[in-house]
Image (cartoon, coloured by chain):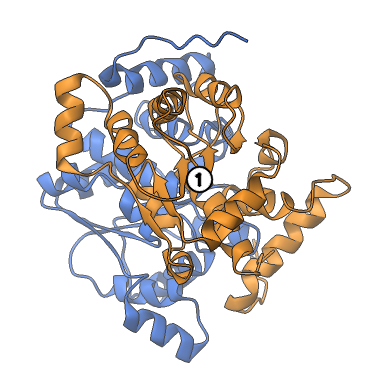
Chain colours: A orange, B blue
Amino acid sequence: MKITLQRVAPAEIEARSMEIIGAELGARSFPADQLPVVKRVIHTSADFDYADNLVFSEGAVARGIAAVKGGCTIVTDTQMAWSGVNKRVLEKFGGRAVCFMSDPDVAAEAKARGETRATVSMERAAALEGSVIFAIGNAPTALVRLCELMDEGKADPALVIGVPVGFVNVVESKELLLTTAAPHIVARGRKGGSNVAAAICNALIYLASGNARE
Amino acid sequence: MKITLQRVAPAEIEARSMEIIGAELGARSFPADQLPVVKRVIHTSADFDYADNLVFSEGAVARGIAAVKGGCTIVTDTQMAWSGVNKRVLEKFGGRAVCFMSDPDVAAEAKARGETRATVSMERAAALEGSVIFAIGNAPTALVRLCELMDEGKADPALVIGVPVGFVNVVESKELLLTTAAPHIVARGRKGGSNVAAAICNALIYLASGNARE
């Protein structure tokens, strides 16, 4: 079999990918603010299911953009998601990305209490000063604990990106978030992941930069 | 709506997830060595498409396990995939995981040559001593360059995990790998990602530990 590679300059690969995604979404209609988020998630996963399962609270994208512009902290529940966030651009706004999952004292406390590290890391994150976007791409226990902290008045996120992935309490954790008043972007169902969490963060960061890169 | 969370201890969540995945794969039959890899990729993505699109060269899993046991280097094409690899267990075998994508000299050389950083980082990786597993979860340009380096006799991987994701030259890059003699695990089609690359590495690492964690 002869394999023919397309000649596309490195700088053009992302733009060409976004064109293809746009074409395959076809006549489907999305609110203009949500479209760059949906497209970036499909770009990172090649999975068009996200065109159906991403749900946004009213004004969620605008809130995310405003938080980034205001120099917010993005908290992730995995080092993978942290790695995927474009910190170079985020830091231009005075923001930062943090993840407490690998902190030795988080692991020690989780073990002592019989909780997941994700649960304890959300408690740490809830104590942060200033505007915080929570980006949860892995652990439903993180999302459930965050919902509890909000209910207890101990957390007030600028936005919750609720996209844990998996099979145990994942669907339920997202449905729980949807019962709260928190501004949110959620991938309903089992799908999600650290890559999806990072992609949504980056979509917001690029929109804040006035460059949707779509 | 009343949302009821399942009571599952943190240490049991992964095992319960693997049970669910096994049950939903149902009567589908996989070679025994491949099954833990397939299940771990579905675990990380909640996407059963990987039951169909993962292809393995003869003995690929055994080669990957042997490489890990022998203290190989795992090279990734993204910091995200690097973050996802279980380096704690890998290092018990004397191995290590590396990624050259963020090296300033790689970026400078890529810019000067009009190539992607991924291309240049593969050239760096090909110069590594000893047994190397290449885990490519993002950049088709990395996989294409690796195929060229193998063709030129400049790279001889223990195993190539070829799972880039996306829309431009992604399918083609994987089909190109399949024409080579390199031992491989490939996600055919558009899907893949840094999470998938890391999941396959971790499946091999856990199998090498005698703990498939399935």
Q: In the picture provided, is A31 more to the left or to the right than A175?
A: right
Which quarter shows the C terminus of chain B?
Answer: top left
Image height check: is B24 above or below B141? above
Nearest the viewer among A17 and B160 is: A17
- At 85% across and 44% down in the image, what residue appears? A28
Q: Residue at x 24, y 42 (%)?
A: B65
The outermost residue toward the bottom is B112
Q: Residue B96: where, in percent of width, then height?
A: 19, 56
The quadrant holding residue B157 is: bottom left
Image spot of residue A157 (x, y percent): 48, 40
Residue B127 percent location from the top left of the image: 26, 75
Residue A42 in sight from this viewpoint: no
* Circle 1 SS class: helix
Q: Is residue B208 above or below residue B83?
A: above
Direction right: furthest residue: A27
Residue B107 visible at all:
yes
> Could you tell me which quadrant the N terminus of chain B lies in?
top right
Residue at image position (17%, 44%) is: B88
Q: Name the amino acid type tagged 1.
A: Ala
Label count reads 1
Image coordinates for residue B32, horizontal then vertical, percent: 36, 25
Q: Which sits in the foreground, A164 or A159? A: A159
The foreground one among B61 and B102 is B102
Q: Chain of mark 1?
A: A
Query: Residue sitting at 39 percent across and 21 percent down?
Result: B18
Q: Residues within 10 Å of mark 1 (few under 14, many from 20)?
A: many
The residue that label 1 is drawn on is A197
In this picture, residue A54 sits left or right of residue B3: right
Against B48, residue B146 (above or below) is: below
